[in-house]
Amino acid sequence: MRQIEIFDTTLRDGEQSAGVNLHGEEKLEIALQLERLGVDVMEAGFPASSPGDFQAVQRIGNVIRHSTVAALARSNQKDIDAVRDALRGAENPRIHLFLATSPIHMVHKLRMTPEQVIETAVASVKYASAWCSNIEWSAEDATRSDWAFLVEVVEAVIDAGATVVNIPDTVGYTTPQEYGDLLRYLRNRVPNMHRAKLSAHCHDDLGLAVANTLAAIEAGVDQVECTVNGIGERAGNASLEEIAVALEIRSDVLRASTRLDLRQTVATSRLVSHLTGLVVPPNKAVVGANAFAHESGIHQDGVLKHASTYEIIRPELVGLDSNVMVLGKHSGRHAFREKCLALGYQLEDAELNELFRCFKALTEHQKEITDADLHTLVVERSIVR
Ligand code: KIV
Ligand code: ZN
């Protein structure tokens, strides 16, 4: 099984979510949890962006020993020097350089010709290679770039010393088929591609970030970039937990695995949600509050007979104790009897029928029936004396 490296960018791209501002202590807490989760690389921040971010990257670099610690820099000497200084104490430092390659960005944002972009990218990689041997280079807005131009620039940065080449879908524009084709095209056309790792980085503007990332894995990338809970600029980045669990559950078709300790998944999600203030939607795959909740009678009956009927992920895999049976208007007698037993009520069939009738009546007015509601029903009906 091929191993995919997980590059987590919760602390850099994730922190670029609107309304999020993590202070140094919080970033360190998340970094330690990411290390527990087992990410291969964590992008700690963008040192040139603010003194606070510089210090946070420095603290993380000084403490984290197992994961590679990366930090972002634009293609200029000031940014590169800031990464060098911030990561001086890091065990495994990586500099992450980027420059846009799409006509839209080159004309309207950079105001540079394609030749100037290649020149600048090469110069930045050479400048960083004076102190760093682990250099990632990203072609910002790669998926709206000319493919032949990408071949040229990627070949040039690898010759200059880049060891990882990242192909971001910066604005979440591509589709799985197209992204896979682009990555295969680069693998086949860039003559020195074998000297660098190939990486995918997807945004979720069209809701395709995870699907695109999985297509990239099928196309043979070595590394995928993602964030916890999929947080990030605009609609966010590809969600780490969805990619990792998809690889675990569908290794039969994806034929790749990660080094993550998936039992840390829910703890990591909760910590990031708590510290960023970004609430995880209840129906979010893998880590949403409803991801392992069963409400309808048919599903509850199936799961109680054999979990695999309606659960493709075991809750224990991601660090939960168990699934949840929610008692609501669709719930059936089987789950209801189990809940009564769990609450300590051993009921005769007639008593159970009577209580079940009252419970159903209550669901006409209430969406969910809690344990406290059930206790009250039992006492009110004087079923247990
Ligand atoms: O989305 C993007 O292009 C980025 C780069 C800085 C890698 O986040
Ligand atoms: Zn990004």
Image (tube, rainbow, N blue to C red):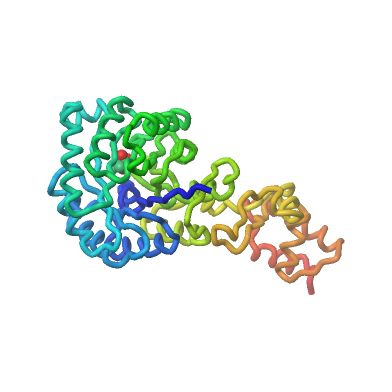
- Residue at image location 20% in from the left, 38% down from the top: 121
Residue at the far bottom: name it. 385
Residue 117 picture quarter = top left
Q: Nearer the viewer, residue 144 or 187?
A: 187
Q: Can see residue 145?
A: yes
Ligand 1 rendered quadrant: top left
- Residue at image location 28% in from the left, 34% down from the top: 155
- Residue at image location 42% in from the left, 41% down from the top: 221
Q: Nearer the viewer, residue 38 or 311?
A: 38
- Residue at image location 58% in from the left, 48% down from the top: 249
Q: Can see residue 361?
A: no
Q: Position of residue 243 (x, y in %)?
A: 49, 46
Quadrant containing the C terminus is bottom right
Q: Position of residue 330 (x, y in %)?
A: 70, 47
Q: Position of residue 298 (x, y in %)?
A: 74, 47
Residue at the far left: name it. 78
313 horizontally vs 357: left or right: left
Q: Position of residue 245 (x, y in %)?
A: 53, 50
Q: Nearer the viewer, residue 116 or 377?
A: 116
In the figure, 29 relative to 75: above or below?
Answer: below
In the figure, 377 relative to 152: above or below?
Answer: below
Query: How many numbered marks, from 0 up?
Result: 0
